[in-house]
Image: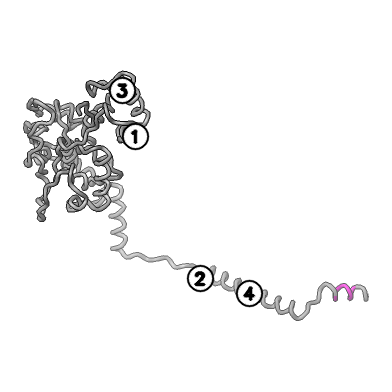
Amino acid sequence: MRLWRKLIRNYFTFNNREKRGLYVLLIVLFILSSIHLVVRLNPTPEIELTDDQLAMIKQFEQAKESNIFPNDSINHRDAQSENPKKPIQWEIFDPNIADSQTLVSNGLDAKIARRLLNYLRSSGSFKSAADLSKIYGMESPWLNAASEYVEIQPLKESLNPIYRTDSFRKDSLKQKSKRLIPLLELNNADSVSLMQLPWVGPFYASEIIKLRNSLGGFRSYTQLLDIYKIRDETFESFIEHTTLDTALLEKVNINLVDLKRLGYHPYLTWKQARIIVNYREQHGNFESIKEILNTRVISDSVYVKIAPYLTTKE
């Protein structure tokens, strides 16, 4: 008997701290059980709808089944397809002399029209309607349709004087600037003068001077695209507010230039410059610039770029 009492006393008795914990646990269980019982005995009442609300729900379901939604994006697209764009009133035009308004009236996107003008201002030209595909973003459907209305007048030379007139340089879609901006010569303007142009700050003015000095001058506006991350607005500003006199190009005498001077030109590598100099030392002076092709390290594309900066005349 004593043994049982001892066992009970050792394993089934609690000290004061354990008793308090047990009381708290029992109280928590009682509260949770009461909450559960109340929820089960009092379910959430159903919402009673009025007759008007039921009628609105019914109309909505019927409209959904019939796909009748005034603001539905699908039906909105269908409505747009039922109202196609007005047909283009085509007119015969010459892309070499047409202004942007003429191009847009013939269905060309305004952004593409400006690219086309920039290409022409950069001494480019079109010899046929197929040449219009040179313009980035030119869409084939428009090009195919426009080919019937393109009439290109024969040009005696690619740099026809018509491309240098002020009337050609203007974009008829743009509003005239209220500020009078001087026309600068890109091949001799200093950085202070260049910063007077719209969208041209110290960075672009400095980069223009650096590139011009390394090249020996600009022969085409497309060379400005070599400037790191040049903005479209800045590029167009140079085209609109500057002239480009190729007579100001600084040419290098291919028969007198040393390797260091020739190798620093942006359009030649050091290897190409070294071979040109070695070829001259072995075969004598060049009689014409075209003879550098005999070195077999100058491709046709490189020759077109570098030739305007070379000369054989003293």
Residue 298 x, y percent position in the rendering: 31, 24
Q: Residue at x 20, y 29 (%)?
A: 314
Q: Where does label 2 land, which residue? A: 42
Mark 4 vs mark 2, CA separation in Å: 21 Å
* Amino acid, disc 3: Arg
Can residue 212 be seen here? The reply is yes
Q: Is residue 207 above or below residue 27?
A: above
Picture disc at residue 28 = 4
Residue shown at the point (25%, 46%) measured from the top left? 231
Residue 104 occupies quadrant: top left
Earlier in the chain: of badge 2 and badge 1, it is 2
Give me the C-alpha separation between circle 3 and circle 4. Answer: 103 Å
Instruction: Locate residue 125: give its quadrant.
Output: top left
Which mark identifies residue 260?
A: 1
Q: CA distance from mark 2 to mark 3?
A: 106 Å
Instruction: Give the magenta range.
Output: 4-9
Residue hosting label 3: 280
Question: Badge 2 local density, few (<14 within 10 Å), some, or many (20+)?
Answer: few
Choose mark 2 or mark 3, whichever is in front. 3
Dot 3 and dot 4 residues touching (CB under 8 Å):
no
Q: Position of residue 242 (x, y in %)?
A: 14, 44
Q: How is the structure coloured here? A: one colour
The front one of 120 and 91 is 120
Q: Percent x, y for residue 139? A: 21, 33
- Residue 177 vertical position relative to residue 121 in the rendered view, above or below: below
The residue at the point 78 percent across, 79 percent down is 15
Q: Amino acid at mark 2?
A: Asn
For the residues labelled 2 and 1, the Cα–Cα distance comes to: 97 Å
Residue 78: x %, y % from top left:
22, 43
Point out the tag, 4 or 2, that comes first from the N-terminus.
4
Q: Earlier in the sequence, mark 4 or mark 1?
A: 4
